[in-house]
Image: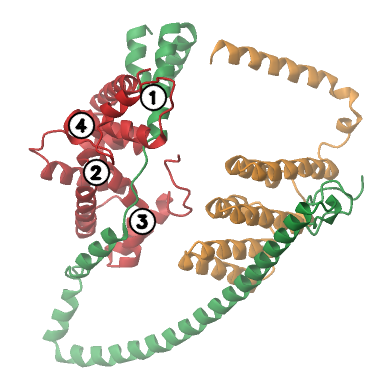
Chain colours: A orange, B green, C red
Amino acid sequence: MRSGDMRSFRLAIAGAVLGVTLFPTMPLLRAQAWDLNKTRSVAESQHEIVMILIRKKEFDKAAEEANKIFQMKWPEDQEPILSKELIWFAGQFHRNRQSALAVRLLETNLSMFKTVKSKVAIWKEKGYLLEAMGQHDKALDCFREAQRLEKAGGHP
Amino acid sequence: MDCRQCSDDLTAYMDGELAESAAQQLKQHLEHCELCRAEYEELRDTATFVSEHAADLEPVPEIWNNLRSRIAELPAPAGSFGVFRFLAMNRWAGMLSTVAATAVLALGLWGYERYEQSRSELESYMSEYIQMRAAQEHQYELRMIQERDNAMQGAPEAERAIDNPFADTRPVALTNPFHAEAR
Amino acid sequence: MTKKSLNPGVDTASPALLARLIEQAKKGDIEAYQSIYDLFSRKVLNFIYRMVASIEEAEDLTQETFVTVYQKLESLKDDAKFEPWLFRIARNYVYQKYRRRVPPTVSVDFLDEEGRTASELADERKDPQEEFQAEELDDVVREVVLELPEKYREVFVLSAIQDLSYQEIAEIVGRSLASVKTDIHRARLQVRKRVKEYLKV
């Protein structure tokens, strides 16, 4: 690390220490360790960040930021919103000619989902994107998986 | 670790190929040694430069096509011949094998039909979704065109369509599903 | 300019998937072999190309490599060693065909689309502040790599461009890990030196 990096690194540490000492004064954080409203509000900001990055055509960064939304702790009842969000982002990448990235996004975040309905939706979307990319056989595999999951029913 | 040792190991360090302990030592040396650090930076810059300008060739389809025809001409994998030789030697084995083969064929045809059926079921399952999505994309494009026209004619921001079914009606963050209702 | 394409499912394969494909290909499943080809053809083509400097010859040798690989697939005992084994075969073809070939020299062999050599391109830069075009920089890299003696060139390409591990490279070229490590380092130093000279930095 160069000396400049060291300096900013030390500043960051100082900032963190300061933040930690101020914690007891923040009522929010004296509450439960995890709070759905807080998570939602973080996700809201992340969504805006992702949309801005997409508009700026910084697609790799946008995907990174999008992943963060799905890695947060969510209860199962939020999955419909989340799967729609994931498919929405993938669609945005696809429209911007970043179909490969869109498929990657779906692949990366699929494992976060536990409900059958979400997984089926994501597999179908992945199949749609692969078909659009001319990969018919791989697309079929995705739809086969979606079909299998649907038939297996309530065994997420 | 002295500068000569460090210099010899720099590339391996950069590639992540040095053992844990040696890498640690080198790292510490770099922190104190201006000259070696400069050399390391240069190596890194060169590596970045090379990887940014090492445009790859794309394999043309002819390679696979030619390759495929040549493979097809090759003899079948060894191991298939032994069975036939055995059958030729034994008359009963021969007849039995004919019966067995016919049964297998019939089973195969039936299985193939089932496979065809399930495959066409799969294909229609797939095309149903694809048609739905294609129609959606079409609608989206029409809307984008409409919005662009509105923007050019100076229509107010509120005309912009809501992209997300979960967005609330507040003017802020119209596409954001996480904009909490209870705020 | 991106070096690697974003191609899901083709860029990398899990070892388990590759092993399965290999087993199926051994039984004569050509579709499986095509998937294997899809996974590695680009890497092999570009490795050969950087060694022989001719697109046509690289394409031919890539074809030969994959035909031989298919024929000899049975003899591969450890599926995990597929990649180094594949590159060994490719490398053998390179040297078999080009054993007596003189490594291309700077001013004679390499010409760009308009028939200019890389050093002429560099000379044309009367204004050192003027930016190089991306294609020209590609040419510089290609040229510098070709200038390397074959022993250095192969390990340079495998490590810096194909991203293989030193261990795998040692297996491919049939030398010790220590010797490979030294050669890679020397190759990088030479590349650095030549790149600096070309860019007159």
| Helix, strand or loop for disc 4 | loop
Between C62 and C21, the residue placed more toward the observer is C62
Q: Is residue C94 left or right of residue C145?
A: left
Q: Nearer the viewer, mark 3 or mark 2?
A: 2
Mark 2 lies on residue = C48
Chain hosting mark 1: B
Residue at 35%, 36% in the rendered image: C161
Locate residue B36, reporting x and y percent.
41, 10
Q: Which residue is mark 3?
A: C38
Furthest residue toward left: C100
Indicate which disc residue C175 carries.
Answer: 4
Q: CA distance from mark 1 to mark 2?
A: 22 Å
Are discs 3 and 2 both within one chain?
yes
Question: What percent of the width, then of the height, locates residue B142?
Answer: 70, 64
- On the rendered image, what quadrant is the N terminus of chain B found in? top left
* Lower sequence index among marks 3 and 4: 3
Q: Secondary structure at mark 1?
A: helix
User: Between tags 3 and 4, which lies in front?
Assistant: 3
State which chain disc 4 sits on.
C
For residue B46, which numbered disc appears in the image? 1
Q: Quadrant of residue B38?
A: top left
Residue at screen point 37% across, 37% down? C135
Q: Earlier in the sequence, mark 3 or mark 2?
A: 3
Q: Amino acid at mark 4?
A: Arg
CA–CA distance in space, label 3 to label 2: 16 Å
What quarter of the picture does the C terminus of chain B occupy? Answer: top right
